[in-house]
Image: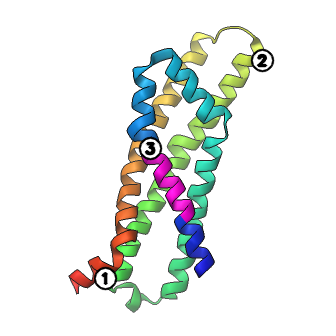
Amino acid sequence: MVILRLIHIVAGVFWAGGAFFLVSFVSPAVEATGAEGRKFIQQMSLKSGMSNAMAGMATLTALSGIIMYIMLTELDTDLMHANYYVILAIGAAAGLAGWIVGLLMITRPTGKMKRIVAEIESSGGPPSPEQMTAMQASAHTVGQGSRIASVLLVIAVVCMASAQPLAALLA
Protein backbone atom coordinates (compact mmCIF):
# COMPACT_ATOMS: atom_id res chain seq x y z
CA MET A 1 0.00 0.00 0.00
CA VAL A 2 2.86 2.41 0.80
CA ILE A 3 4.44 1.83 -2.61
CA LEU A 4 1.11 2.30 -4.38
CA ARG A 5 0.49 5.50 -2.47
CA LEU A 6 3.93 6.86 -3.36
CA ILE A 7 3.39 6.01 -7.01
CA HIS A 8 -0.06 7.62 -6.90
CA ILE A 9 1.18 10.82 -5.25
CA VAL A 10 4.35 11.30 -7.29
CA ALA A 11 2.71 10.47 -10.62
CA GLY A 12 -0.36 12.54 -9.71
CA VAL A 13 1.73 15.58 -8.78
CA PHE A 14 3.63 15.30 -12.08
CA TRP A 15 0.41 14.89 -14.09
CA ALA A 16 -1.73 17.52 -12.37
CA GLY A 17 1.13 19.98 -11.89
CA GLY A 18 2.16 19.63 -15.52
CA ALA A 19 -1.42 20.12 -16.69
CA PHE A 20 -1.95 23.19 -14.50
CA PHE A 21 1.37 24.72 -15.60
CA LEU A 22 0.66 24.13 -19.29
CA VAL A 23 -2.89 25.50 -19.19
CA SER A 24 -2.12 28.46 -16.90
CA PHE A 25 1.24 29.65 -18.22
CA VAL A 26 2.64 27.86 -21.27
CA SER A 27 -0.47 27.97 -23.49
CA PRO A 28 -1.10 31.70 -22.98
CA ALA A 29 2.59 32.43 -23.65
CA VAL A 30 2.52 30.31 -26.81
CA GLU A 31 -0.60 32.11 -28.05
CA ALA A 32 0.95 35.51 -27.32
CA THR A 33 4.18 34.77 -29.20
CA GLY A 34 2.67 33.55 -32.47
CA ALA A 35 4.89 31.54 -34.83
CA GLU A 36 7.79 31.34 -32.36
CA GLY A 37 5.45 30.06 -29.67
CA ARG A 38 4.09 27.42 -32.03
CA LYS A 39 7.66 26.25 -32.75
CA PHE A 40 8.30 26.01 -29.01
CA ILE A 41 5.12 24.06 -28.25
CA GLN A 42 5.75 21.78 -31.22
CA GLN A 43 9.23 20.99 -29.92
CA MET A 44 8.03 20.55 -26.35
CA SER A 45 4.92 18.50 -26.94
CA LEU A 46 5.69 16.63 -30.13
CA LYS A 47 9.43 15.97 -30.01
CA SER A 48 10.62 16.11 -26.39
CA GLY A 49 8.59 13.19 -25.06
CA MET A 50 6.54 15.39 -22.75
CA SER A 51 3.24 14.09 -24.14
CA ASN A 52 4.26 10.49 -23.53
CA ALA A 53 5.49 11.35 -20.02
CA MET A 54 2.20 13.07 -19.15
CA ALA A 55 0.16 10.15 -20.52
CA GLY A 56 2.32 7.68 -18.61
CA MET A 57 2.02 9.57 -15.34
CA ALA A 58 -1.75 9.90 -15.82
CA THR A 59 -2.02 6.15 -16.37
CA LEU A 60 0.16 5.34 -13.33
CA THR A 61 -1.96 7.68 -11.22
CA ALA A 62 -5.22 6.11 -12.39
CA LEU A 63 -4.09 2.50 -12.03
CA SER A 64 -2.50 2.94 -8.61
CA GLY A 65 -5.59 4.83 -7.42
CA ILE A 66 -7.97 2.12 -8.60
CA ILE A 67 -5.90 -0.61 -6.94
CA MET A 68 -5.67 1.35 -3.66
CA TYR A 69 -9.42 2.06 -3.59
CA ILE A 70 -10.18 -1.63 -4.09
CA MET A 71 -7.67 -2.58 -1.38
CA LEU A 72 -9.03 0.02 1.07
CA THR A 73 -12.70 -0.77 0.61
CA GLU A 74 -12.43 -4.44 -0.35
CA LEU A 75 -15.45 -3.41 -2.46
CA ASP A 76 -17.60 -3.48 0.69
CA THR A 77 -20.61 -1.36 -0.30
CA ASP A 78 -21.39 -0.43 3.30
CA LEU A 79 -17.88 0.89 3.77
CA MET A 80 -17.99 2.66 0.40
CA HIS A 81 -20.97 4.71 1.63
CA ALA A 82 -18.91 6.27 4.44
CA ASN A 83 -18.21 9.96 3.81
CA TYR A 84 -14.44 9.44 3.47
CA TYR A 85 -14.82 6.84 0.72
CA VAL A 86 -17.56 8.81 -1.04
CA ILE A 87 -15.23 11.84 -1.22
CA LEU A 88 -12.41 9.63 -2.50
CA ALA A 89 -14.81 8.17 -5.08
CA ILE A 90 -15.78 11.66 -6.27
CA GLY A 91 -12.09 12.51 -6.63
CA ALA A 92 -11.45 9.21 -8.37
CA ALA A 93 -14.31 9.78 -10.80
CA ALA A 94 -12.99 13.25 -11.63
CA GLY A 95 -9.45 11.90 -12.03
CA LEU A 96 -10.57 9.04 -14.25
CA ALA A 97 -12.67 11.43 -16.33
CA GLY A 98 -9.57 13.64 -16.67
CA TRP A 99 -7.56 10.60 -17.76
CA ILE A 100 -10.18 9.69 -20.40
CA VAL A 101 -10.36 13.29 -21.64
CA GLY A 102 -6.57 13.30 -21.83
CA LEU A 103 -6.56 10.10 -23.85
CA LEU A 104 -9.27 11.18 -26.28
CA MET A 105 -8.67 14.92 -26.56
CA ILE A 106 -4.93 15.24 -25.92
CA THR A 107 -3.03 12.00 -26.58
CA ARG A 108 -4.81 10.99 -29.80
CA PRO A 109 -4.72 14.43 -31.46
CA THR A 110 -1.09 14.85 -30.38
CA GLY A 111 -0.29 11.56 -32.10
CA LYS A 112 -2.04 12.83 -35.21
CA MET A 113 0.02 16.03 -35.09
CA LYS A 114 3.23 14.00 -34.73
CA ARG A 115 2.34 12.03 -37.86
CA ILE A 116 1.59 15.22 -39.81
CA VAL A 117 4.86 16.83 -38.70
CA ALA A 118 6.73 13.70 -39.82
CA GLU A 119 5.00 13.89 -43.22
CA ILE A 120 5.90 17.56 -43.59
CA GLU A 121 9.52 16.95 -42.60
CA SER A 122 9.87 13.98 -44.96
CA SER A 123 8.44 15.96 -47.87
CA GLY A 124 11.01 18.72 -47.32
CA GLY A 125 8.49 21.35 -48.33
CA PRO A 126 6.01 23.57 -46.58
CA PRO A 127 2.84 22.03 -45.14
CA SER A 128 -0.09 21.65 -47.49
CA PRO A 129 -3.31 23.53 -46.72
CA GLU A 130 -4.87 20.21 -45.68
CA GLN A 131 -2.01 19.50 -43.30
CA MET A 132 -2.27 22.99 -41.79
CA THR A 133 -6.02 22.60 -41.32
CA ALA A 134 -5.56 19.19 -39.67
CA MET A 135 -2.79 20.55 -37.40
CA GLN A 136 -4.93 23.53 -36.36
CA ALA A 137 -7.96 21.32 -35.67
CA SER A 138 -5.85 18.92 -33.60
CA ALA A 139 -4.22 21.79 -31.69
CA HIS A 140 -7.67 23.22 -30.92
CA THR A 141 -8.85 19.85 -29.62
CA VAL A 142 -5.72 19.50 -27.46
CA GLY A 143 -6.29 22.99 -26.01
CA GLN A 144 -9.90 22.22 -25.15
CA GLY A 145 -8.99 18.84 -23.72
CA SER A 146 -6.23 20.38 -21.61
CA ARG A 147 -8.62 22.91 -20.08
CA ILE A 148 -11.30 20.28 -19.38
CA ALA A 149 -8.78 17.82 -17.92
CA SER A 150 -7.31 20.57 -15.71
CA VAL A 151 -10.70 21.37 -14.19
CA LEU A 152 -11.32 17.67 -13.53
CA LEU A 153 -7.86 17.35 -11.97
CA VAL A 154 -8.55 20.28 -9.64
CA ILE A 155 -11.63 18.43 -8.41
CA ALA A 156 -9.64 15.20 -8.03
CA VAL A 157 -6.79 16.88 -6.15
CA VAL A 158 -9.14 18.75 -3.80
CA CYS A 159 -11.08 15.56 -3.01
CA MET A 160 -7.97 13.45 -2.50
CA ALA A 161 -6.16 16.02 -0.39
CA SER A 162 -9.14 16.88 1.79
CA ALA A 163 -11.09 13.62 2.04
CA GLN A 164 -10.33 13.08 5.73
CA PRO A 165 -11.14 16.59 7.01
CA LEU A 166 -14.20 16.89 4.74
CA ALA A 167 -15.48 13.53 5.96
CA ALA A 168 -15.03 14.70 9.56
CA LEU A 169 -16.98 17.89 8.83
CA LEU A 170 -19.81 15.92 7.26
CA ALA A 171 -20.00 13.41 10.11
Residue 15 visible here: yes
- Dominant SS of magenta comes to helix
Residue 150 relative to residue 102: left or right? left
Q: Which quadrant of the structure image shows residue 95?
A: bottom left
Q: Residue at x 36, y 51 (%)?
A: 151
Q: Residue at x 53, y 22 (%)?
A: 38
Extent of the magenta region: 10-20
| Up-down relation of residue 163 to residue 71 (above or below) | above
Of residue 162 and residue 65, the one placed in the foreground of this image is 162
Of residue 136 and residue 157, the one placed in the foreground of this image is 157
For mark 1, what is the residue? 83
Q: Amino acid at mark 3?
A: Phe
For mark 3, what is the residue? 21
Q: Earlier in the sequence, mark 2 or mark 1?
A: 1
Q: Are marks 2 and 3 in contact (CB under 8 Å)?
A: no
| Up-down relation of residue 125 to residue 162 (above or below) | above
Residue 112 visible here: no
For mark 2, what is the residue? 122
